[in-house]
Image (cartoon, rainbow, N blue to C red):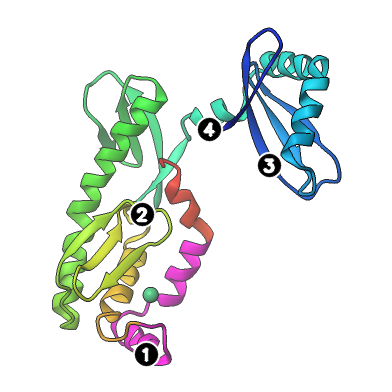
Amino acid sequence: MPATHTLTDGRTIVLHIKRNTCTHLIVRPRDGGSIYLGIPPWLPEKEWRRWLAAHENVLQDILAKGQARPRTAATAQQAAPESIWLYGRPHALASHDAADIRIVDECILLPQAAWPEQQQRLRQHLYQLAAADLLPRLNDHAQRTGLHPAATALTRAKTFWGVCRPHSGIRLNWRLIGAPPQVADYVCVHELCHLRHADHSRAFWALVDTHTPHTAAAKQWLKRHGSELFVLG
Ligand SMILES: [Zn+2]
């Protein structure tokens, strides 16, 4: 639950609080119904709440400024990106009149709709592509390396590219469908090698090296572009 503050006219505004290292309270416009509030770590809640109550004129000013903004940070995030990664190549996004999603050359054509809806459909579509590409890929590497996980599946996790557990097997992040095939290959091999070595020991990396030449390049690609694979959430 975000913090709120109630104005004397009964209107409730949302406070987007940042506990930062600033030396004084910072109030910045966001939109017509919420503000950004930077709070010094040493300032107790009772104190900054008292300040808000005592400076309603300032808050009204800030809210009016927020209202006048052409685009808030929140709506900026809602805007469609110009392109997204697929199979390691940027694909331009465009709308078309048909009801399905089509990938033509390096362009993804989406049914006409507001971006949040297009985004959801695109995410589902890419998840299916991921299932059709990443899981057989993992299986191929299992056959090739002789390292066989108990099971394989995709994951929607936001903090790792792959995970390997002795009993539940290997799960690969569906967003790897955006990465170049060699990067997906590397993650498959990395997780398969964890069946032999649970840690990241020298022996583990030696085993990875025997099964893929792509380790360094793949790590570098993920470091550089990994966060861009999360653009659809
Ligand atoms: Zn690992």
Q: Position of residue 18 (x, y in %)?
A: 68, 41
Q: Secondary structure at mark 4?
A: helix
Instruction: Name the one closer to the observer, 57 or 106.
Output: 57
Residue position for label 2: 157
Query: Could you tell me if the residues under marks 2 and 3 are in contact, i.e. CB atoms within 8 Å?
Result: no
- Is the residue marked by circle 2 packed among few (<14), some (14-19), or many (20+) residues within 10 Å? some
Instruction: Name the one closer to the observer, 58 or 143.
Output: 58
- Is the residue marked by circle 3 packed among few (<14), some (14-19), or many (20+) residues within 10 Å? some
Cα separation, mark 1 vs mark 3, equals 44 Å
Q: Quadrant of the C terminus?
A: top left
Is residue 211 among the parts visible in the rendering? yes
Q: Is residue 233 above or below residue 227?
A: above
Cα separation, mark 4 vs mark 3, equals 19 Å
Residue position for label 3: 18
- Is the residue marked by circle 4 packed among few (<14), some (14-19), or many (20+) residues within 10 Å? few
- Amino acid under disc 1: Ala
Cα separation, mark 4 vs mark 2, equals 20 Å
